[in-house]
Image (spheres, rainbow, N blue to C red):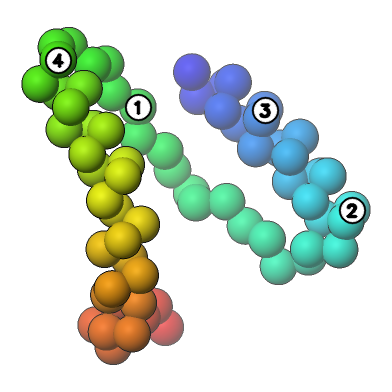
C-alpha cells in the first residue's frame, strides 16, 4: 500500500509543480485502516463528512495555527 500511495503522490506532484504550484506539498504520512464492520464504516463516514466542518470552525483558533 505504501509504495502505491508513494507512486501516486510522486506522479501527481510532478504534474502539480509543472502547472506552477511550486509550494504544493503532501501530508507526510497517511493512515490506512481495515474496516471490520458496519459500525466502524459508519464512524469513518461520519468523520469524513464532519471533519471539514470542524476544520472550518477551528481555522481561526490561534492554537490550531502551525508556526
Up the image or down, 27 lies above or below 64; here it is above
| Residue underneath mark 3 | 7
Asked whether 43 or 27 is in front, the reply is 43
The answer to which of marks 2 and 1 sits earlier in the sequence is: 2
Q: Whole-percent x and y of residue 48?
A: 32, 42
Who is closer to the viewer here, 4 or 15? 15
Q: Which residue is mark 4?
A: 38
First-in-chain label (4 vs 1): 1
Residue at (35, 77) in percent of width and height: 59
**Would residue 3 be found to the left or right of residue 64 on screen?**
right
Q: Are marks 4 and 3 in contact (CB under 8 Å)?
A: no
**For residue 11, what is the image quadrant?**
top right
Give the spatial CA distance, label 2 vs label 3: 17 Å
Could you tell me which secondary element the residue under label 2 belongs to?
helix
Q: CA distance from mark 4 to mark 2?
A: 42 Å
Label 4 residue SS: helix
Q: Residue at x 36, y 57 (%)?
A: 52
Image position, residue 24 (x, y; %): 68, 61
Q: In the drawing, does residue 63 fall left or right of residue 26? A: left
Disc 1 versus disc 3: distance between alpha carbons?
16 Å
Q: Residue furthest bottom?
A: 62
Amino acid at each position: 500500500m505504501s509504495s502505491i500511495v508513494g507512486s501516486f503522490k510522486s506522479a501527481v506532484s510532478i504534474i502539480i509543480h509543472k502547472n506552477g504550484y511550486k509550494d504544493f506539498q503532501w501530508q507526510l504520512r497517511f493512515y490506512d485502516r481495515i474496516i471490520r464492520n458496519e459500525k466502524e464504516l459508519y464512524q469513518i463516514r461520519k468523520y469524513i463528512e464532519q471533519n471539514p466542518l470542524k476544520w472550518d470552525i477551528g481555522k481561526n483558533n490561534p492554537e490550531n495555527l502551525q508556526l
